[in-house]
Image (tube, grey):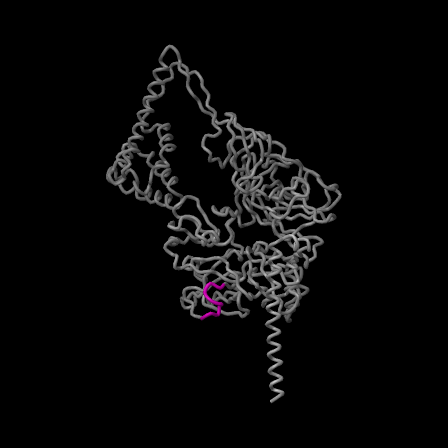
């Protein structure tokens, strides 16, 4: 529970101890036995205990649980396209496969009349069905606290010495980011001396700052948030590696009081000197240091995609050759995989340009330790751009964490192979693109082969009905009239299954399930026609089209049979699924290196997913080269590595250069705002001092 961001709840009776309606606080402790939670509010420095189930009362609502490492790794927001929704997930109960993050949900994206399901955690119990937002407008509140634009000063958990330039100094919040795997828990503050540092607001229940002037954090629907103490809103967060504290037991003597600051230093050292790689669907991998699985991957250098994560230290990989296997990513301290590319999982360094190809770096970033401000993307780094005798820092994702790798001149290179440019492919395990790859051949039929007349059990008839009318059938509208015509054609259980499928996966999936179940019964075709013509359903045109389709197929079959019996055999069309040539590797939406453009044997060209959200639409027929990589320079999937030669105090510091301050108008505006605030604070303190002096002079005269 530590780190949850909360607001006042339905049983609140504590006045304005939180700063007022909508003001945000952080849970710093939770007592399971007492069912109480201790909160530090952004606008106050005191710790106050509230009810979280005690005597059936709930004083708090959970505004955001991303700070406790809650992430939905396989779900993207369909509005802002956030890859892997952090915190609460909101799924439309009407539209198929439509999800929103908290920011988009509370800012009224999508249809306001649609109901939504709230998923509090990725693997938790749920979901919770909510009322439509259009009926809840009177429940909207404005959140306020430590958000971008807030004015802050040092808080109760401050451990950063004089980074704020002394007691009483104030700073401006310029950004909110992730602190490792605790999301939206790091606040970047610019102080009056024009330095910028990162601080914790929610990370492991720690709050380094106090809000002097609150900023707006967006609106929220009060009745749609989970109750703290009632709903399961946290996942198991990141833990220290086994044995890490044991290595430092010399600092904590048994049976005597120990130095709390020493323990804090251990935790601080761990935070700044360890890099934990987040495993996300879409990461492209190759075999790693503990590989013991022969050529399941196709051979050394062959590439695969992580498509699912097992919480017991395993990852499921789909190799480009089409095989799927499960591998160790920490189980019994074994690591079977290395990370070749993180760009397909959504990692992009939006403010860092590659100094060789001049593109924004997507995926792993490589920074030269010898040259000032020189960065390379993975493609340029592995193709030996820049001096190969220089050592580099490797940045796995968007964080200050980095690992020093050896120079390339003394390292082993491996050629990557898989679905790259010039590879030959066919449809793969996640294919959902119909017959884009189909090849139609015209051949002469042999005499004496007579097709059987079409009937209601014809596979061709069923296929055409499914393709042509699935989009038009409304399952929930027609289920209620089936009993009029044949009580036993669908069981109660089957009808309920269709209702659930339609409600949670959409009309198309529900119609598809309805047709699949109907096909199992004799007389399904006539029953379906009767239902569609019913006065309650009123789909007579659809029924007529179905009946016409059956007769057309019958006529076509009879014509083919007549042609086969004539002296001149008629040509017959046959269909097969062809192969394609990969023309290039592309982006899918804004996610890089996760799609391939393919030209098929039928001369059509389309783009397909190769890593996007862990999906792979293609399978290798013949691999092509994807360029060399330095094997020992790649991060090991699931392993926490030591960050060599990294000074702990520099990981938290972010100094702006004088050139940035002069050329960036937004930065200038922030600096000027700080100057005004500091000037006002100085005037107020001067007024107080003068008032005290005048009071003293009056006392002396008396």
**Along the line of sight, the residue nearer the viewer: 157 or 461:** 157
Q: Residue at x 62, y 52 (%)?
A: 399
Residue 672, above or below 637: below
Residue 20 is covered by the magenta coloring: yes
In the foreground, 479 or 312 = 479
User: What segment is highlighted magenta in the picture?
Assistant: 15-23
Give residue 609's position: percent from left, percent from top.
52, 37
Residue 485 in the image: above or below residue 604: below
Q: Is residue 410 visible?
A: no
The quarter of the displayed image where residue 543 is located? top left
Residue 652 located left or right of residue 508: right
Question: Chief secondary structure of the magenta span?
Answer: loop
256 and 637: which one is in front? 637
Q: Position of residue 566 (x, y in %)?
A: 36, 12
User: Relative to residue 358, is residue 565 drawn left or right?
Assistant: left
Residue 628 % position (x, y): 67, 37
């Amino acid at each position: 529970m530590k780190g949850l961001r909360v607001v006042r709840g339905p049983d609140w009776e504590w006045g304005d101890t939180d700063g007022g309606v909508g003001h945000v606080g952080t849970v710093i402790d939770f007592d399971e036995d007492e069912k109480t939670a201790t909160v530090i509010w952004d606008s106050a420095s005191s710790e106050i205990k509230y009810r979280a189930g005690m005597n059936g009362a709930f004083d708090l609502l959970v505004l955001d649980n991303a700070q406790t490492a809650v992430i939905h790794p396989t779900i993207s927001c369909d509005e802002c396209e956030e890859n892997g929704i952090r915190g609460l997930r909101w799924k439309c109960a009407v539209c198929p496969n439509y999800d929103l993050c908290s920011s988009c949900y509370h800012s009224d994206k999508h249809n306001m009349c649609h109901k939504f399901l709230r998923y509090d955690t990725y693997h938790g119990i749920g979901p919770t069905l909510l009322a439509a937002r259009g009926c809840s407008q009177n429940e909207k509140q404005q959140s306020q606290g430590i958000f971008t634009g807030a004015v802050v000063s040092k808080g109760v958990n401050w451990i950063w010495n004089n980074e704020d330039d002394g007691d009483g100094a104030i700073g401006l919040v310029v950004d909110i980011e992730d602190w490792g795997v605790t999301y939206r828990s790091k606040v970047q503050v610019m102080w009056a001396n024009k330095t910028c540092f990162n601080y914790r607001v929610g990370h492991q229940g720690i709050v380094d700052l106090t809000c002097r002037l609150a900023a707006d954090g967006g609106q929220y629907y009060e009745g749609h948030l989970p109750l703290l103490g009632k709903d399961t809103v946290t996942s198991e967060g990141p833990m220290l590696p086994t044995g890490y504290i044991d290595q430092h037991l010399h600092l904590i003597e048994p049976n005597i009081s120990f130095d709390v600051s020493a323990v804090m230093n251990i935790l601080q050292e761990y935070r700044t000197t360890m890099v934990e790689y987040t495993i996300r669907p879409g990461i492209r991998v190759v075999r790693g240091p503990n590989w013991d699985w022969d050529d399941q991957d196709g051979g050394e250098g062959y590439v695969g995609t992580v498509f699912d994560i097992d919480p017991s230290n395993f990852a499921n990989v789909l190799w480009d050759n089409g095989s799927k296997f499960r591998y160790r990513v920490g189980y019994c301290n074994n690591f079977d995989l290395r990370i070749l590319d993180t760009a397909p999982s959504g990692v992009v360094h939006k403010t860092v340009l590659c100094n060789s190809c001049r593109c924004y770096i997507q995926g792993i970033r490589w920074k030269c330790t010898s040259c000032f401000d020189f960065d390379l993307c993975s493609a340029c780094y592995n193709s030996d751009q820049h001096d190969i005798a220089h050592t580099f820092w490797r940045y796995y994702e968007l964080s200050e964490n980095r690992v020093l790798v050896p120079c390339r001149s003394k390292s082993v290179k491996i050629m990557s192979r898989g679905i790259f440019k010039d590879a030959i492919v066919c449809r793969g395990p996640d294919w959902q693109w119909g017959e884009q790859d189909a090849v139609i051949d015209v051949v002469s039929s042999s005499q004496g082969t007579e097709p059987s007349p079409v009937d209601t059990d014809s596979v061709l008839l069923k296929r055409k009905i499914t393709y042509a009318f699935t989009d038009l059938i409304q399952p929930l509208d027609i289920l209620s009239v089936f009993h009029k015509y044949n009580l036993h054609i669908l069981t109660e259980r089957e009808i309920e299954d269709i209702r659930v499928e339609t409600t949670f996966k959409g009309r198309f999936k529900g119609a598809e399930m309805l047709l699949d179940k109907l096909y199992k019964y004799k007389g399904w075709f006539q029953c379906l026609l009767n239902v569609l013509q019913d006065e309650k359903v009123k789909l007579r045109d659809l029924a007529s089209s179905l009946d016409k389709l059956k007769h057309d197929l019958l006529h076509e079959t009879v014509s083919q049979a007549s042609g086969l019996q004539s002296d001149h055999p008629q040509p017959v069309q046959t269909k097969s699924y062809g192969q394609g040539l990969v023309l290039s590797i592309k982006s899918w939406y804004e996610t890089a290196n996760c799609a391939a453009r393919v030209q098929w044997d039928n001369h059509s060209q389309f783009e397909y997913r190769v890593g996007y959200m862990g999906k792979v639409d293609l399978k290798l027929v013949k691999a092509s080269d994807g360029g060399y990589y330095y094997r020992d320079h790649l991060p090991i999937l699931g392993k926490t590595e030591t960050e060599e030669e990294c000074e702990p105090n520099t990981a938290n510091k972010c100094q702006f250069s004088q050139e940035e301050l002069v050329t960036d108008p937004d930065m200038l505006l922030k600096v000027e705002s700080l100057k005004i605030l500091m000037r006002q604070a100085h005037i107020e303190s001067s007024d107080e001092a003068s008032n005290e002096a005048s009071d003293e002079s009056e006392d002396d005269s008396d």
